[in-house]
Image (cartoon, rainbow, N blue to C red):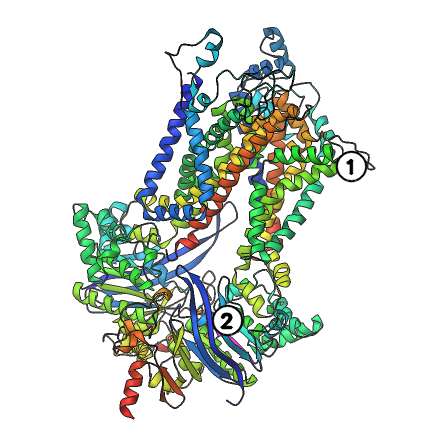
Amino acid sequence: MESYVLSNLITSALVAGLALALWGARRSPLWRNAGRELARRRPVALAVVAAYALVAGLDSVAWTDPHHEVAESEAVLLGEPRSAIDRLFPADFQEASYSAPFADHELYGGEALRHPGGHWLGTDIIGRDVLHRTLKGARVALIIGGLTSLIVLPLALLVGVSAGYVGGRVDDVVFFLMSTLASMPSLLLLIALIMVLGVGTVQVCVALGVTGWVGLARLVRAETFKIRELEYVDAARVLGTSELRIVGRHVLPNLMHLVVITFALLFSSLVLSEVVLSWLGIGIEGSWGRMIDQARTELSREPVIWWGITSASVALFSLILAVNQLADAVRDILDPRTVGEES
Amino acid sequence: MSAGPALLRVEGLETHFPVRTGPLHRVTGAVRAVDGVDLVVEAGKTLALVGESGCGKTTVGRSILGLERPRAGRILFDGVDLLALDRAGFAPYRKRIQMVFQDPAAALDPRMRIREAVAEGMVAFGIGTSRSERTEIVASLLARVKLDPDVMSRYPHQLSGGQRQRVSIARALAVDPELVVCDESVSALDVSIQAQILNLLADLQRERRLAYLFITHDLGVVRHVADRVAVMYLGQVVEEGPVARVFDAPAHPYTEGLLAAAPSLDPDRGPRPVVVRGDVPSPSNPPPGCRFHTRCPHVFARCRVEPPPTFDVDGGMSRCFLREP
Amino acid sequence: MSDTVLDVGDLRTSFPSAEGRVDVVDRVSFDVGAGETVALVGESGCGKSMTALSIMRLVPKPGRVEGGSIRVGARDVRTLPVAEMRRVRGGDVSMIFQEPMTSLNPVQRCGRQIVEAIRLHHPESSEEARRRARDLFGEVGIPDAEARLDAYPHQLSGGMRQRVMIAMALASRPKLLIADEPTTALDVTIQAQILELLRTLQREHRMAVLLITHDLGIVNEIADRVLVMYAGRIIEEGGRRDVLARPGHPYTRGLLRSLPGVVERGARLEEIAGVVPRPSEWGAGCRFTNRCPLAFDPCAGTEAPRVEVGARHVAWCHAAARDEGGRS
Amino acid sequence: MIAYVLRRLAYGFATVLGVLAFLFGLFFLYATPEDMARRALGDKAPPQAIEQWIVNHEYHHPLFWNPENPGKTLIVDHYRRMLTFDFGRSDADDVRVTTRLREGVGPSLSLTVPLFFGGLVLSISLALFVATFRETYIDRAGVALCVLAMSVSILLYIIGGQFLIARILKWFPISGYDADPAVIARFLVLPVLVGLAASFGEQVRFYRTVFVEETNRDYVRTARAKGCGDGRVMWHHVLRNAMIPIITRVVLAIPFLFTGSILLESFFAIPGLGSMTVDAIHANDFATLRVMVFLGSVFFIAGQIVTDVCYTLADPRVRLE
């Protein structure tokens, strides 16, 4: 399968998952209130995340222009599928060397640029526009967080709830499995998995998922244990409700706040993990981690190429900071100790 | 024990909780929460089960509802032993026995609206054919427990404690039970709200000929609601009888002590001397002989070795050698 | 009641809410004399515990004391410097709490906790302090004191733990003991023992006790005087017998009549209709208006007047004022 | 207690067997010996060379079942080698893995031990300070700073630290290592500082949450009611009660003392176990990686047992039976 087709498919799956979650949340006033409260407390962080999502969305769907007449020299570039973000930048900006932000000539060789001043953030060591790469990094970051979460959340819920609710032997087995996985140092396990699975977006996300689900599954298991003993579950039993229905109507809805909080916390740690993986040479192509990794050679140049790593770092930092702030707020808002009080 | 038709008859009920320790969860002991309890609840009447925390009164109630697995004994409801039934066989009896829990905040799912909470039992037992029909029934039930119908679309945390307890009662009534186990149903409420709920329960009993098993530690409540009372201590019923007789002429030293300890509201009565001293022993290692002998003011040698049998006392029984004929 | 140990005047303590700060304790005034037991009684959320914590300056954040005076002896604790206040806490004024299980430090031996309380206020050697702790244990009726000093709180029963709390509170011979629902978490037979202990100690030390409770039965067992609180305000004050036998406020009357065990068996209990208003619903007038069977025109709009319904027996009620006026 | 520890050890051993099963699945079933050989020798290697490589590394036995010699299978070999700590030779350059481990553990510890204790003392003190002023601007500013610090990738701390302190200010060498006690500090100060900066945000915030939770408990109110001041409440009562979560976190961090800090070591060219892991990744050295994962989990499992025992020291309510 063409890589851009796969990427488009993943994107649509993510969008569908998000839409489903939002649709489900909208039906419940409790979640609607939580959402409103979040918007009230952290409007800036929410706007930042929305902006990233917009950029990522614009970059997610790529298409080719079959009827576009292209010159011989540009065929290779324009014949490839390009996203809306790609189309904002001239397809032919591949320069022979690199330039500083807003420069009108190349640093190495000093020739005039084809787009003088057009590279707002300069170009990297092989002449790629830094702004373009930085914007494209948003999609990669959201894919890392989103796709991995799509793997982690259902798996952890299924395993955690069944272990916690059924208990007994099922729990023994699940607990053993979890403690086995959890006992391996996560970064080493991650490295081992990627080395065996191979490098690539899906592989990295699968590896992150395998190392990441245990934490949530443990939380879910412990919380299910607690919920199972609560009076409202007893009340449902006394009213003749079947066990399966109890899980669906009572246990799962009361776990959702945990899932949302974990998702928010997980997201930033996943994106930061990918940066480390990139530096180890096994990250995802096009990520900010790759740009930072590339800075190792760029920083030793004279004059120093600082703009690449700076813009990647700023982009990374603002996303992570916004997500962390949202996670903090979400944790406060959904804390069961505050849910019980007046709304 | 009584002349009326027994709706519920509990015989020799024993419910123990295994004490599991270590990562391998091996059973190393047992908490003998309920250790040989006999009870009778007559149709349309109220039996109060009274005792201090840890005496096993709640476990009796939970065992009757199938929430605990007793290890011995019989629970005869309408003549059928519930413990001998399998899951499917037990299902129809679920509908006939309901429960109102202690903490109305914990007994209602915080993420479920009042309408769904009250309708939960109806859905399970197929009462009402459509959603709208069930909503109508819910509305009439809420009206019966004196709640505004617009609470239907609210969540439990938006209600006060008393309102939540009314919802719990409406939920139990929804499946039209014959016996309702009230487990400390008014203990968590403020006095002024408690009176509202007690009156409501009394009205419902008259209207629907409900039988109550009223589990409580509050002697004032017992005296007010009960026809008969059973006093529990460390997993056993130590005294049982009509409420007036038990309060006026207690036949067990523990009952005596309990009555003496309860603060009275008579402004002319001065403070009384403390009768029962010391602490309740652990139910995982109850004392030999009479279980009350470690705290009993009348203890004698025989009490320490020989567990007393039950002796008939004026329409009830007592588990004390002093009552030996 | 010659010397006043505690004198609270116009105390206001507020908490933030959706509608801004609300005074959950609203202009509360009362005093406690030496050797006197005063019960502060009311339903949950009426502000009785906050009153007690305000006296100790222990109101949890984000609550704060907004105004009024709190005199312990000759000093106003509201304006004391922090270091001085520390000497008052556990020195002149001690406090015990509802949950003896969680109120003791779970990882420290009981003896050490008491020794800490002693040594915070008296420069004694640790051996001396330990000897004193042992004596205190004997005084509060803890058998086998030496062994219990080395016990951790979880190794004791609920009643024993509350005795440890009391021993700790007595460590520096306080002039005033504030007991916040000291027996609510205990079984009746244990409750009777603790109440008896409090009575004995109070007599022996001529200690003033401010007892906070929701249980009128306990009030009857132990109090000399009663303060009834409703929705942040004191609505009745008087001697135990006067308040319980001839309540002057319709709320107190309702409370007493709604108790099961007082009326005939099977008879209907008197209900106080409705629910306690939330702080956001407190109006300008009497806060009991919406539930009061006697409410009439002025109740909702104007503050209830202070009415002497008996000797040293006061109620804040429009209806009582009307009756009083009619009589005189 | 002893019975409990023995049972715990047995369960720990079972977990180790589980880890080994997982590693076998990953490294022998999913990635086959041919894959490993091809990665080590390159795609264009002749079949004979691959064959030879497999035999040299003793990967030529059947996976599960060898009718001729039941003891000679890959799975038996895998378990026997790991459990006897006979790790064989590296896939990349045939050096004995144990030799490498012995050489690497010293440099790793010299970096991670000061980092560990420095971080612990620093973050707990800061967290206690911030928690003392909870619900004030100091607290809010502290938390905001922590979230800010957490949002920066560790790579940026390293690159930034090297760039600023070593290249511009020239206070310390950019990287390098010398075990000579006279100069070792020169090389370690910068990585330790960078490591502290990278971890303090997350740690302080965690400990603050623990402490704040603890300060809301009833016994703290009792302590204040008997006249304890802020400092006494925090150091005598709260800290002691917060020990359970602290121990859990601290003991579980100990394995990383031995496996080393992968990023710090390789950036600062410290020849420890972390650098060794990075080399293994670049050289496609599956044997070394397998050993590192295995050792990491052995340390982790041992740490968990130690944690359980520490609980009894920290909290008298915990009894191990």
- Relative height, residue D162 to residue B178 (above, below): above
Q: Residue furthest bottom?
A: C328
Q: Which amino acid does label 1 sit on?
A: Arg
Relative to C108, is C46 on the left or the right? Answer: left
Q: Disc 1 on helix, strand or loop?
A: helix
* Whether residue A172 is visible: no
**Magenta highlight range:** C171-180
> Which residue is under mark 2?
C54
* Whether residue D47 is visible: yes
Q: Distance between the residues labelled 1 and 2?
A: 56 Å
Whether the magenta-drawn stretch holds residue C176 is answered as yes
Instruction: Assign the N terminus of chain A to one quadrant of the image.
Output: top left
Question: Which chain is indicated by disc 2?
Answer: C
Callout 1: 10 Å neighbours few (<14), some, many (20+)? some
> Which residue is under mark 1?
D186
Residue B273 in percent (x, y) is at 45, 83
Q: Disc 2 on helix, strand or loop?
A: helix
Residue B107 in percent (x, y) is at 34, 56
Q: Are marks 1 and 2 on the same chain?
A: no
Residue D311 in percent (x, y) is at 59, 51
